[in-house]
Image (cartoon, rainbow, N blue to C red):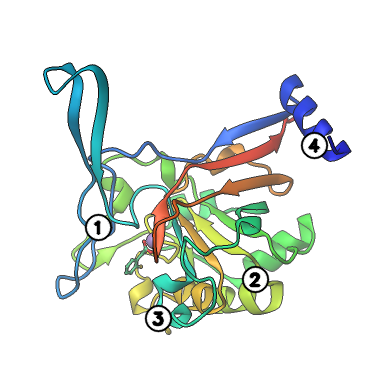
Amino acid sequence: MSKALELLVSELATGQLEVVDLTFTLREDSPIIVLPPEFGESAPVRIERISRYDAAGPAWYWNNLSFGEHTGTHFDAPVHWFTGRDLPLNTVDTLPVGRMVAPANVIDCSAESAADPDFLLTRAHVEAWEARHGRIAPGTWVLLRTDWSKRTGLDYANLGDDGAHTPGPDAEVMEWLVAERDILGFGTETIGTDAGQGGHFIPPYPAHHFLHGGGRYGLQCLCGLDQLPAKGAVLMTAPLKIHEGSGSPLRVLALVPRAV
Ligand code: 23J
Ligand code: MN
């Protein structure tokens, strides 16, 4: 075995490295995005029993599933947005598997998001984070910690008459993170990679626009980002291999050095 893999296995065994789950349980009441009424909508999650040690299957239990690709904790591929429609390897089934293991930078905006549900991450916030933690390396994730995943019920989607009020990035920071920091992708604890009001930004839904136009990825409905250090965790993000899929629910795991 390579030295790196030997060390990985041994640090996992001793608990020096921990595996942290950043995934919500997929269930029938999993929150899903609600778009303006003129657009198509994602169907709710359905988990329908085929059998459970009964007449339909005396010795076995299994379910049929149905859900939209963008449901629960999920991955967005470049083809999801018109800006990424013609890029190579832009669907979940063609995504290079080497991209599915990558470091994470975690920007803690939990206090700002508690004070203002429409909080927007700006380039100035990221530059202040870099002054403390070092420059964001190419090919790494930027995760926006808001502690939004601790909200329950209607407070999570936080829908008003004028759409959702949830934190997210502004347009400038997304264009800059892709062009100037060459990030792998951007992840949030909210229903979208974009802010709840992101449809009103220029361009509309700037996180989707710039990430996917640059061939980068999105993660949404992550939970428990408060368990990650600002730097030093590695994410494993393997979406389902759906033919021509635009995204998929997935299990997001983080390898995290134990706090000492
Ligand atoms: C479809 C249309 C707009 C948006 C989204 C989906 C998402 O947020 C998503 O889950 O990718 S903003
Ligand atoms: Mn999505």
Q: Name which residue lies at 48% across and 52% down.
A: 239
**The residue carrying mark 2 has its beta carbon less than 8 Å from ligand 1:** no
Q: Is residue 202 left or right of residue 123?
A: left
Q: Position of residue 227 (x, y in %)?
A: 59, 37
> Which sits in the foreground, 100 or 225?
100
Is the CB atom of the residue marked by disc 3 within 8 angstroms of ligand 1's nearest atom?
no
Could you say which quadrant of the image residue 96 lies in? Answer: bottom right
How much space separates mark 1 and mark 4, taking CA atoms? 46 Å
Which mark, by number, is residue 5?
A: 4
Q: Are the residues at dot 4 and dot 3 in contact (C-beta closer than 8 Å)?
A: no
Per the model, the C-alpha gap separating discs 1 and 2 is 28 Å
Disc 4 CB within 8 Å of nearest ligand 2 atom: no
Q: Quadrant of ligand 1?
A: bottom left
Report the quarter where the C terminus lies. Answer: top right
Q: Is residue 105 above or below residue 181?
A: above
Q: Position of residue 256 (x, y in %)?
A: 68, 37
Q: Give the alpha-carbon distance from disc 2 to disc 4, as whole Å.
A: 38 Å
Instruction: Name above or below for residue 166 compared with residue 36.
Output: above
Q: Nearer the viewer, mark 1 or mark 4?
A: 4
Look at the image and tell me in which quarter the N terminus lies.
top right
Residue where numbered disc 2 is placed: 124
Q: Which residue is mark 3?
A: 82
Q: Residues within 10 Å of mark 2 (few under 14, many from 20)?
A: few
**Residue 260 located left or right of residue 78:** right
Which residue does the numbered mark 1 point to in the structure image?
159
